[in-house]
Amino acid sequence: MWAQAGLENPITSVQTNVSGGANETFRNPPEITSSGGVLNATLRAERKEIDIAGQKVNATVYNGLYTPPTLRVRPGDTMHIKLENALEHEMNLHHHGSNVSPLNNSDNIFLHIKPGQTFDQQVFYPPEHPPGMLWYHSHRHGLVEPQIFGGMSGAIIVDGILDPFPQLQGVKERIMLLKDFQNIGGRILTENIDSNAGTTRTINGVENPTIKIHPGETQFWRIGNVGADIYYRLKLDGHTLYELGKDGNRKNQLVPQEEILLPPGARTEVLVQGGPQGTYKLRTLSFDQGADGDNYPEVTLATLISEGPAEEPIALLTKEQFPMVEDLQTQPIAHRRTFVFSEDPDTNQFYINRRQFDENRIDTNVTLGTIEEWTIRNVANEEHVFHMHQGDFQVIEVNGKPLPFTGRQDEVDLPVKSEVKILVPFTNPVMVGKFVYHCHIVAHEDSGMMAIIQVVRP
């Protein structure tokens, strides 16, 4: 399968025009944008034969598209989404990274939308919602991996992340959704998925697209790992990735990165400044999840071509230009908790604090208005990914080493045999209700590595 998984094909991956240059084959996903404070959309989940990276496969998709519409709102807007379930199994819709209500017909992952049903979802994005890149996917427990792996994931953009920076107004925005698939007899599997068996990696459903930039030009790239199980370790040859946002949260400073690790579900928003004329690879480097995990080879994700008239690079943002983000380490801690992520590789069962997920059990009760310190231990021989719904947190320490404060996120990687400390603010009234925290390698979540939290008013 590795032959499919990103090795360049000069015929299919980079198209040439009659003048000998390369055409740009990258395209942003289609979009649905809010108007007058409201976004109206229909998402129909169905199995359909589609074309992905030049291969015809039967996939599980929204609106017949492997890369469905990006849903773009402003803080203060409301999404009205009509969900149509044309699948043979139950589904629902989760707004990953959104600071919105988990109740009723909002971002409620406990809903079971049955085959043939239509459901009207209404999600209000509060005026104070952080701007940035989020994403949507089905979150029906036990079916999360096959439904995401089959293609049921897309982007959400809460606009405004560049508003504080006048010099960045009008820069080219690129939305890059990283997905992988396996073509097994013309079908993407929905059971017995082996993410270590080799997958074709795509950006917006295209294998190794070409991207154009002028030397010195500044572009804004929003990159999301919206696949089910696998990691991306990003490197753009000859360029620094200047990270401006992470997991839908603007940072408090620009962070230069030579590599960026995106576990399943994570997003990064970066500035890229075109290098000297030439061709460069955007690669995902090889990654080893540990003795009981998967091992992924290096793959070329895209080819960046720097050509045309040179532009004067935009001056890089200084820390003083960034709006302040509150450092939670200055606040009192109401409660300290420890969570242990473990597994039994022989039975393929996964645990948090020695318990598997039970939809009828509340595992953690929290009082609104408090800040808690959580210690998350991974005692397994493979990496896991901690994710919490309805809010963001601040990572303060990994394996006893304090981390510099640059902002918040909604996911954190848990290396093999590691201990990670985070501060979680349960201060936003929108969080009242019950929701979940889990491993975002969703095969692990489906196999038990998830728990329920309930936030109640004092």
Image (spheres, grey):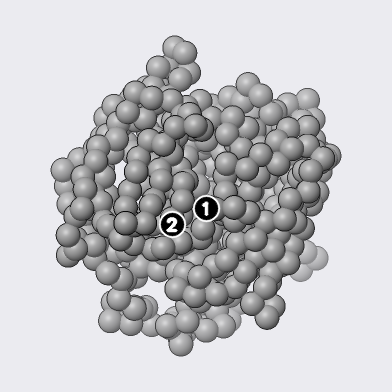
Question: Residue tagged by mark 2?
Answer: 431
Residue type for callout 2: Met
The quadrant in which residue 333 appears is bottom left
Q: In which quadrant of the rendered image does the N terminus lie?
A: top right
Question: Residue tagged by mark 1?
Answer: 102
- Which residue is most to the front? 458
Residue 216 visible in the picture? no
Pinpoint residue 341: horizontal percent, then vertical percent: 34, 30
Identify which residue is drawn at 59% across, 52% down.
Answer: 104
Residue 351 visible in the picture? yes
Instruction: Name which of mark 2 and mark 1 comes first in the sequence.
Output: 1
Using residue 198 as the reference point, say whether residue 395 is left or right of it: left
Pinpoint residue 233: horizontal percent, then vertical percent: 44, 46
Q: In which quadrant of the rendered image does the C terminus lie?
A: bottom left
Q: Nearer the viewer, residue 84 or 105?
A: 105
Identify which residue is drawn at 76% across, 68% down.
Answer: 19
